[in-house]
Each structure stands twice: as C-alpha cells, then as structure tokens.
Amino acid sequence: MRFTLLIRRTSRRTFIAAALAAGAVLPLGQALAAPFASERITVRTEGSGPDVVLIPGLNSSPRTWASTVAAVPGYRYHLVQVSGFAGQPAGANQEGLVAAPVAAEIARYIQESHLKQPAVIGHSMGGTIGLMLAARHPDSLSRLMVVDMFPYLGMMFAGPGAGPDRVAAVADRVAAARLHEAAVPEQRAKAAGDTIVGMVDNQAMRPVATADVLASDPDVGSRAMRELIVTNLIPELPTIAVPVTVLYIQPKSVPIPAAQFDAAYQGAYAPVKKLTLTRIPDSAHFIMWDQPARFQAEMKTFLDARSR
C-alpha cells in the first residue's frame, strides 16, 4: 500500500518536473498546448526554416505543392487541406460558405500555432482565401502570393459591369450544372477530365488533378464555386497592407488581346498598395506544374524578399 502510494507520488512529481522543464524551454502557453483541431481544414508540416503556409485551390489537395516543396527547401511548409476536397470528409464545410470560414480557420491555425506572420501562398481558390486573410486578418501574415486568381470572378463569368443580381444568377447556374454533372458518375468523370485538360498543360500531372476532383465532395465544390463567383474582394484590397505578388496566366478560352487581358488584372488589383503583378506565358492554370522552373524562381524571389 505504502509502496504503491510512493510510486504514485513519485510519478506525479516526475510529471510535474517534466512539465516545468518543458515550460522552461517553450514559451508560456505552448508547453502543454493541445494540437490544432478543425472541422474545416487539416494542416501538416514539412521541412524546417521560416514558416510558409500553402493553400491549394478548389477540389485540390496539398499534392499541388509537392514538387515545389521538394525544389525549394529551407522553409517550414504548412500544407493546408480543405475539408470536402480530395477525399477529406466535408466536416463543417458540408453546408454554407467555404472560402470565408476556411480563411478564418487558417488565421486561427496561425495564431494557435504561434507562427510569426508567415508568408502565405494560395493557388486559385487558395488565392482568394489568401486575399481574405490579408484583408480580414491582417496580423496573420507577412506577405501574400496569389497564383492565378482574379479578385472578383463575377466579372469573368457575368461580364464587366454586371450587377450583383446578374452575377448571383450566373453563379447559381454554374453551381447547379456542377451538381447535375456529378449525379452521373460517367458524366462527372468526363467533365472532370475535360476541365483539367484546360487547366493543366503538363500531361503527366493531369491524372493527379483529376483524381483530386473526383475524390472531392460535389456539393462542397459547387457551393465553393458559387461563393468564389459572387465574392467581390476588390473593395477590400485597399485595406491590405502586406506586399502582394500575383502570378497569372491568360486562359486559352479567353481569346482577347493580351493587352486587354493584362489591363483587366491591372485594374482589378490596382487598389493593393504593395503589388507585384506578373504574367506567366506558356502556362495553364497550374503554373507550378506547367512552368515549374519559372514558378520556383518567382517563389524564391517572393520568399527572399521577406528577409530584406
């Protein structure tokens, strides 16, 4: 009896000593901090060095960044996976908005993980989420790279000058069409394949993107797409104080003069105070796969600027 009690007391002292030792090494609040948990995102880390948060696009996964992470070492990458995309259960994204609450969750992750204003890079919908972070959670990041995303897709889908009602009607039709395609597996597979052909020039990577799309929840994807079309971030751009780099391409499906397309991007992003806007030629939507050397060079320049 006394022996058992002695063991318990000793174990308790050992635990307290270990906790105190951990507290002496880690900042207060981190020693016994619970791991980050969310029903909207998961995050895994790779590498070591300054923190960089990578956000993939609609119906995509962290596989989007795999080759880039391997080619640009020296950073601790935080790879975000949005619930409902690429096989991850929908969780809290099973209803309502997706991009805006995911942006809030990433801000919470940054805060609770005690990251000191990491750089953020977002592709497509991830770029929209990055803009939301920069505008609505300004203390969360030090700089932002947006990879091929317009700040108001309503202009692209409904035309310049279209009012909110017109944009919403177009967005409703797009979302409904996506759900209709998803109802028939063969039709969904063909639609996904056709879409990816237009978004990825690198034929070796098309199966990766297609697999992510087919493993995504159609309802989450359709609602997220609708949200992206109706969300106008241009009025929020003047509030962004951090440097913003935008890489963009001109889709083959938009056969207008290059100068006209460039002017649309320049006009939309003009309110950003610290802006670097760069057109990437000979690439489709997944620049990191279609022009990997160019993308990695642009990314290194973007990340290196953080230390200057």
Image: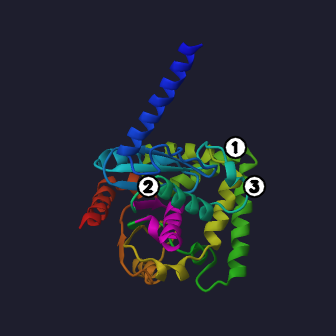
Expressed as whole percent of the image width and height from the top left, the position of residue 70 reads 33, 44
Expressed as whole percent of the image width and height from the top left, the position of residue 259 reads 40, 81
Q: What element carries label 1?
A: helix
Expressed as whole percent of the image width and height from the top left, the position of residue 20 reads 42, 40
Q: Which residue lies furthest to the front in this view?
A: 2
In the rendered structure, find residue 186 and report the number of the disc placed on it.
1
- Label 2 CA crowd tier, 10 Å (few <14, some 14–19, many 20+): few
Nearer to me, 118 or 251: 118
Expressed as whole percent of the image width and height from the top left, the position of residue 55 reads 48, 56
Magenta-colored span = 118-141
Q: What element carries label 2?
A: loop
Image colouring: rainbow
Residue drawn where x is 56% and y is 45% of the image:
212
The amino acid sitting under disc 3 is His
In the rendered structure, find residue 180 and report the number of the disc placed on it.
3
Question: Looking at the image, do the residues carrying marks 1 and 2 touch, with CB atoms under 8 Å apart?
Answer: no
- Label 3 CA crowd tier, 10 Å (few <14, some 14–19, many 20+): few
Q: Looking at the image, is mark 3 or mark 1 earlier in the sequence?
A: 3
In terms of image quadrants, where is residue 145? Answer: bottom left
